[in-house]
Image (cartoon, grey):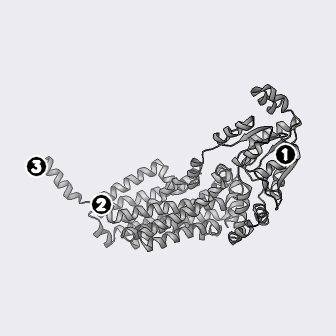
Amino acid sequence: MNYLHETALNKDKEFHISCNIDVPLCVDMDGTLIKTDIFFETLIIALRKRWRNVFFMPIWLSRGKAFLKRKLLGFGVPDPQSIPYNSELIEYLKSERDFGRKITLVTASDILAAGPVARHVGVFDDVMASDGGMNLKGAAKAQALVNRFGERGFVYAGNDKSDLEVWRRARCAIVVNAPEGLARKVAETTPIVCEFPGRIPVFRELVRAMRCYQWVKNILVFVPIVAAHRFFEMKGLIPTLLVFLALCAGASGGYLINDLMDIESDRRHPRKRERPFASGNLPLQFCLLGPILSIIGLIIGMMVSVICFMLILLYITLSISYSEYLKTRPIIDIFLLAGLYTLRVVIGGVSSGNFASIWLLNFSGFLFLSLGILKRYSEYSEDQGKEGNSIYNRRGYTKYDMQALIIMGISSSFTSAVILGLYIDSTQAQVAYRTPLILWGIVPLVLFWQCRMWLATTRGYMLDDPIVYAAKDRVSKIIGFLSLTLFILASIDIKKIFTIFYNHIFAG
């Protein structure tokens, strides 16, 4: 007895008799057989090939959805080997096929995309799909199946509310990755013989795709107001909080756009294939949130000032440019990474009115250049032994470049420490701090932290963004706490505080 018979028998013995092995099984593709939607897959390919296609799409759509799908496929067909599949359903279909059941792939996607998928899975006897003229969805799909197999002459596996029309005319139903409410509606008209839940909460996957943990990098906007000893002044703090939110929105929007543009390479990556879009756990429709979040970030920036708006626009533009092209240009990519870090400091200074000094910009520039090289080296180390040099050949690096990157990175680390030391001995530091001598304790701490980060990376421990890694690392937190303590002690009049304390305790 096969799965379909067994499940039906448990529910209704009489139904078991009517749903025999001769009843063909018809399977939907988008969201059912595969975890993604071929239409959005082809849309991404078309926009990557030629972004101006966005202006032609309304014209193509005016001739019907089927025509639009066919036109988009003209720019490329999704690779059936990289598409995320519903493995449990495929095992089920193989079992049904072994028992002799005829299985047909029935989809609203175009036959040019459905055919390769069917051949790759290897369990289908036939394929019914849109053909550039007719969009095989909803009522049209139901009628096509009735014309071929007769009323109540087939089993149908689907996942979407548009499949209700098909289920109403099927002998029995298989529900895949559907909400509970939809399953109840199906059960009202058609017996459900099998369900494949497997539905992952969209909100959770969306939060993952937005990479909210990366927002920790935007704390850099508070550096100028802290360095100016004005953190508790609301006049500068509130605008800085606003640009922090703006950068968070812009960064998350950029991550969503980047993940869509890199979806094919992510699916071939040993770790990145688990990302929400690449794995199919987050519907590609949520790609629209990318530009929306970026626009929200720009609006918030405009609320602060025109200059902040322009700087945030520059940040978003550089981030997307990096993701799309500049990350493939050696050396340019690490300088751009350092620039994006430093730009956060500049934006924070502009928003609060405490403009970053030349000392702060020099120190930040070399520190972030070191961290940018560190990030690139860590990514290279992670991929060694997994995919060879294919990723880094595309980015312009080879294994022979890694030694040079280490030299450049560590040199930048020591240079940042030298600049910090020169600043402490400068006139500006003597004016800005009550006891600048205490700041010398920060120099070895900063240098120790960077050396430790490099050691962790070369040993293969650091496989994340350096600042994100530091936010999770216990030793980095201790170093940060000690540095902040020394900064505070250097900022206050220790002699005066000691005198007050002495008089209070000992002089009575």
Query: Mark 2 is on which residue type?
Result: Ala
Nearest-to-viewer mark from 3 and 1: 1
Q: In the drawing, does residue 126 fall left or right of residue 198?
A: right
Residues at circles 2 and 3 in contact by the CB criterion of under 8 Å: no
Q: Which residue is mark 1?
A: 146
Q: Name the residue that disc number 3 marks.
A: 507
Q: Is 391 positioned to the left or the right of 443 in the image?
A: right
Asked which secondary structure carries label 2, the reply is: helix
Counting from the top left corner in percent of width and height, residue 73 is at 78, 63
Which residue type does callout 3 highlight? Ala
Which picture quadrant has residue 199? top right
Question: Disc 3 and disc 1: Cα gap in Å?
Answer: 100 Å
Q: Residues within 10 Å of mark 3 (few under 14, many from 20)?
A: few
Element on which disc 3 rests = loop
167 or 421: nearer the viewer: 167
Per the model, the C-alpha gap separating discs 2 and 1 is 82 Å
**CA neighbours of label 2 inside 10 A, class few (<14), some (14 to 19), many (20+):** some
Identify residue for label 2: 490
Give the side of residue 172 with respect to residue 409, left or right: right
* Helix, strand or loop under label 1: helix
Image position of 126 (left or right of 339) = right
Which is closer to the viewer, label 2 or label 1? Answer: 1
Q: Residue furthest left?
A: 508
